[in-house]
Image (spheres, helix red, strand yellow):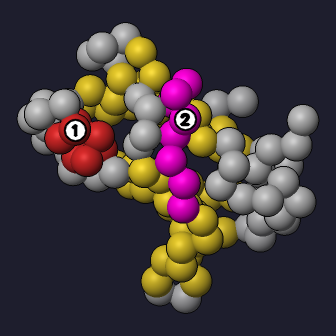
Amino acid sequence: MSRSPITCHVLDSTLGRPASSVNVSLAALAQSDFQILAQGQTDNDGRCTTLLDPSSKLSPGIYRMTFETGQYFARDSRPSFYPRVEILFTLPDTPDPHYHIPLLLSPFSYTTYRGS
């Protein structure tokens, strides 16, 4: 199955389930500003696998994945400390064909790592 070269997965660790309908954007650093490449939303399993066309080739550089976490928590009237989570990451000179960015989320903390 073809998938975007960059995917993400958001898990709500407080509720112990995937975080669905979280708005996500992907941007690349160009000069001194980030340029949005794609926008999407997590599915019922908390995944966003369709940000970019599967045939997209990514250039080496700095990228930013943004998760609109404040909107997510506000839907259930849950207070949160982070209205938005921005994860900056670097793609090397010889990028892999796929990068996966998991986000483990709670109203007052978050954790991320490079997934597979």
Question: Magenta region: which residues?
Answer: 39-46
Q: Find residue 60 and report its image quarter.
A: bottom right
State whether residue 114 appears in this view.
no
| Residue marked by disc 2 | 43
Q: Mark 2 and mark 1: span between their CA atoms?
A: 16 Å
Front one among 21 and 113 = 21
Mark 2: give few (<14), some (14-19) or many (20+) Cα within 10 Å.
some
* Outermost residue, bottom side: 31
Q: Whole-percent x and y of residue 92? A: 74, 59
Q: Residue at x 30, y 14 (%)?
A: 15
Q: Residue at x 68, y 42 (%)?
A: 49
Along the polypeptide, which appears first: circle 2 or circle 1? Answer: 2
Amino acid beneath label 1: Arg
Amino acid beneath label 2: Asp
Q: Residue at x 41, y 43 (%)?
A: 22
* Horizontal relation, residue 56 to residue 28: left or right: right
Location of the N terminus by quadrant is top right
| Residue marked by disc 1 | 75
Location of the C terminus by quadrant is top right
* Horizontal relation, residue 56 to residue 61: left or right: right
Residue 26 included in the magenta stretch of the image: no
Name the element at disc 1.
helix
Q: Which mark is residue 110?
A: none
Which SS type dominates the magenta stretch? loop
Q: Whole-percent x and y of residue 42? A: 51, 40
Q: Whole-percent x and y of residue 78? A: 13, 31
Mark 1: give few (<14), some (14-19) or many (20+) Cα within 10 Å.
few
